[in-house]
Image (cartoon, rainbow, N blue to C red):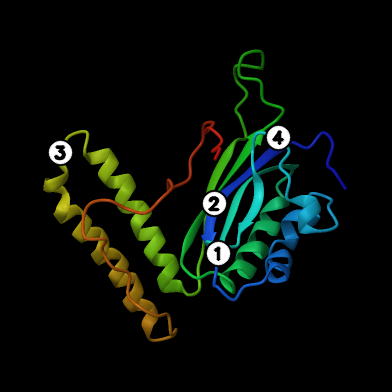
């Protein structure tokens, strides 16, 4: 059922490449934690966002792409729904992907509120993929993008090859530490430059703009 007077507006944003053999029924089952949380009886019923300008949850069958730009009212218990969704999407994903989730504090008024009161806004980055190596690849690409964007304020991109190599080494070491216990596919690799994958990594406070298609 809809949650009235919920303490947060929660925005879920991300594109997840799915295997070519994935069916709509499988997607509906994987996303059940989200649409049930919204009080819907099916994915079709729950795919619409709280905001009309947001496209909501869509499956682009031609590209085999799950697209999410969807807002729901909720509380901290929504994190459990996210965990369940990610576990299910791991089974359907063709490649690694990042999903951004922003919790907007609906009770916080920056202009009229108590100056000593702090917003409970939160931002988390979730990762899904067919295996840990695919997930680590996305994490690596996002970190490279963040670091390069920061350092290019002071250095030319061509000067940052050593920094990217050190990041690759860190992820390579993490991969090697897992090899003995898991079969996780290929080792995360560099992208051939100082660029990275899509999105923005990390956690942080402050309000982040919603992403609209």
Q: Residue at x 83, y 53 (%)?
A: 40
Q: Is residue 140 left or right of residue 203?
A: left
Q: Which residue is mark 1?
A: 64
Q: How many marks?
A: 4
Residue 14 disc label: 2
- Of discs 3 and 1, which sits in the foreground? 1
How busy is the neighbourhood of tag 1: few (under 14 within 10 Å), some, or many (20 plus)? some
Dividing the image into 4 quarters, which one contains the C terminus?
top right
- Disc 3 secondary structure class: loop
**Residue 164 at x, y = what percent?**
22, 56
CB contact under 8 Å: marks 3 and 1: no
**In the orientation shown, which residue stands out farthest toward the front?**
62
Observer-nearest residue: 212 or 163? 212
**Residue 168 at x, y = what percent?**
26, 63
Q: Residue at x 77, y 51 (%)?
A: 46
Q: Is residue 207 left or right of residue 199?
A: right
Q: Which residue is mark 3?
A: 155
Residue 89 disc label: none
- Of discs 4 and 2, which sits in the foreground? 4
Compute the Cα span from label 4 to label 2. Answer: 18 Å
Q: Earlier in the sequence, mark 3 or mark 2?
A: 2
Q: Which residue is mark 4?
A: 52
**In the orientation shown, which residue stands out farthest toward the right?**
1
**Residue 130 at x, y = what percent?**
50, 73
Compute the Cα span from label 3 to label 1. Answer: 39 Å
**In the orientation shown, which residue stands out farthest toward the top?**
112
Q: In the rendered image of this protein, does residue 78 appear above or below residue 62? A: above
């Amino acid at each position: 059922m809809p949650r009235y007077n919920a303490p947060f507006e929660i925005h879920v944003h991300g594109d997840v490449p799915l295997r070519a053999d994935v069916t709509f029924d499988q997607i509906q089952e994987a996303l059940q934690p989200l649409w049930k949380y919204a009080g819907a009886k099916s994915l079709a019923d729950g795919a619409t966002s709280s905001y009309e300008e947001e496209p909501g949850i869509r499956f682009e069958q031609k590209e085999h792409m799950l697209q999410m730009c969807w807002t729901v009212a909720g509380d901290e218990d929504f994190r459990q729904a996210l965990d369940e969704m990610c576990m299910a999407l791991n089974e359907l994903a063709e490649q690694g992907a990042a999903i951004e989730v922003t919790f907007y504090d609906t009770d916080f008024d920056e202009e009229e509120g108590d100056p000593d009161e702090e917003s409970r806004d939160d931002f988390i980055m979730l990762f899904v993929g067919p295996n840990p190596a695919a997930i680590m690849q996305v994490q690596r690409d996002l970190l490279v993008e963040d670091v390069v964007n920061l350092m290019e304020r002071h250095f030319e991109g061509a000067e940052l090859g050593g920094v990217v190599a050190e990041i690759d080494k860190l992820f390579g070491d993490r991969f090697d530490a897992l090899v003995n216990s898991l079969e996780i596919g290929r080792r995360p690799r560099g992208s051939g430059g100082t660029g990275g994958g899509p999105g923005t990594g990390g956690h942080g406070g402050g309000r982040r703009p919603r992403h609209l298609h």
